[in-house]
Image (spheres, rainbow, N blue to C red):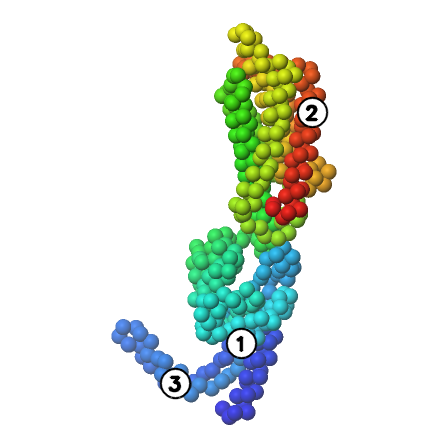
Amino acid sequence: MDHQHIEELKKEHALLSADGFRVLAIATRDVELREKSAHGATPYGKADECDLTLRGYVAFLDPPKEGAAAALRALQLHGVAVKVLTGDNELVARKICRDVGLPTEFSLMGDEVERMSDEELAAVAERTTLFARVSPAHKQRIIRALQSRKRIVGFMGDGINDAPALHVADVGISVDTAVDIAKESADMILLEKSLLVLDEGVIEGRKVFSNIVKYVRMGASSNFGNMFSVLGASIFVPFLPMLPVQILANNLLYDIGQTTIPTDAVDPERITLPRRWDIGELTRFVLFIGPCSSVFDYTTYLVMLYLFKCWDVSTPVAALHSASVFQTGWFVESLLTQTLIIHVIRTNKVPFLQSRSSWPVMLTSVAIMSVGVAIPFMPLGHYLGFSPLPALYWPVLVVTLLCYVLLTQGVKMWMLRRAWI
């Protein structure tokens, strides 16, 4: 073909590509019929693929899935950066990106990726949205480059060429219509047609993570505070501050109260952006929130010893009665404060007013606190070594609970103002 025809054909190819079509050129050549060899091998070879006559183009349109644009907008609103890695040419890729609302100011071609070192690729990969004409090895390198910048990378693909990237990504995602190797390499397979399920999965994952953090905070801070309380009581109380069976009962009831944490509601600001596990944040939380419970454990000790005369160990009977009343008083206070404080720890807002827990959490909290109040008067309480408490104990307990909530909330807000948690 002469130069003019070649330029016209290139323009036509560019126009089709810019319109989102994948373009396949069709060319033919007449050759003589040849017989197959004795081994059945084809009698035609690569040498025959010359002097062809161009017959035209076949254009394939593969439009974005319905709902793709909405899904990408939702992901971007929730802090997920979306990038396109494709083997298609740049023109087709740019058209598809425009259709779904992805910016393409920053793009890289496969040959450019090939020339870059790993360090150079890592530096530009974060701001690049479109990678076109990339090979399976390029996709793998790009993902590793993002991971080297402490990014958590999810990759979605359904073809053979996507298998290496699916394998190396932190989360490999495929679809039920993908080729077998892609599905085997993926961590999860989407069964729904809508891509909005990706955003729903991200949000649900953040809720799970947030509730896991709540659970760890509650358990760690509670145990840290109890350690100080038991240590102090063991030094100056003239009997066991709580019997082993009572400690087990306390822990059992408290743990039952925490079993509904996975169902808890999560504040919207906790799931707007991705969050990482921060051991430093947990340590600060435990060190400052944990001892708050010890403050009121010690006030309970003083009330039981001085107000209710639990110092009296002058006779075996008096000692037994004093120990039982003291142990019952601390058991009830410890269980109720630990259970109530769940609602303070579970949110960075003001509990009950600005943020409410889910109904299962609320219901179990009420149930556990009710059991804690009733157990000294139940037959089971007698077998656990509990005694009925004086009437004056209950208003003192109410004041203790109120002060504990106010102190813990105050310490929490103080830490929030300093961005420590």
Q: Earlier in the sequence, mark 3 or mark 1?
A: 1
Report if residue 40 is visible in the image. yes
Q: Residue at x 56, y 80 (%)?
A: 13
Q: Amino acid at mark 1?
A: Val
Does 382 appear above or below 62? above
Q: CA distance from mark 3 to mark 1?
A: 26 Å
| Amino acid type of the residue that numbered disc 3 sits on in the rendered structure | Val
Examine the image and state in which quarter residue 339 appears.
top right
* SS at mark 2 in the image: helix
Mark 2 and mark 3 lie on one chain; the one further toward the N terminus is 3
> Dividing the picture into quarters, in which one does residue 371 lie?
top right
Q: Is residue 175 left or right of residue 37?
A: right
- Per the image, label 3 sits on a secondary structure element best described as loop
Q: Nearer the viewer, mark 3 or mark 1?
A: 1
Q: Examine the rendered structure and indicate whether residue 331 appears above or below residue 321.
A: below
Name the mark on residue 23.
Answer: 1
Which one is in front in this view, the residue at disc 2 or the one at disc 3? 2
Q: Residues within 10 Å of mark 1 (few under 14, many from 20)?
A: some
Q: Nearer the viewer, mark 2 or mark 1?
A: 2
- Residue matched to label 2: 398
Q: Which mark is residue 31?
A: 3
Of residue 83 and residue 182, the one placed in the foreground of this image is 83
Q: Nearer the viewer, residue 345 or 144?
A: 345
Task: Name which residue lies at 64% across and 52% down.
Answer: 272
Which residue sits furthest left? 38
Q: Is residue 77 above or below residue 243?
A: below
Question: Whole-percent x and y of residue 111?
Answer: 47, 75
Where does residue 368 sit, x and y in percent of width and height? 61, 26
Task: Tell me the residue at 53%/68% (across/down).
Answer: 124
Relative image position of residue 324 (x, y in whole percent): 56, 14
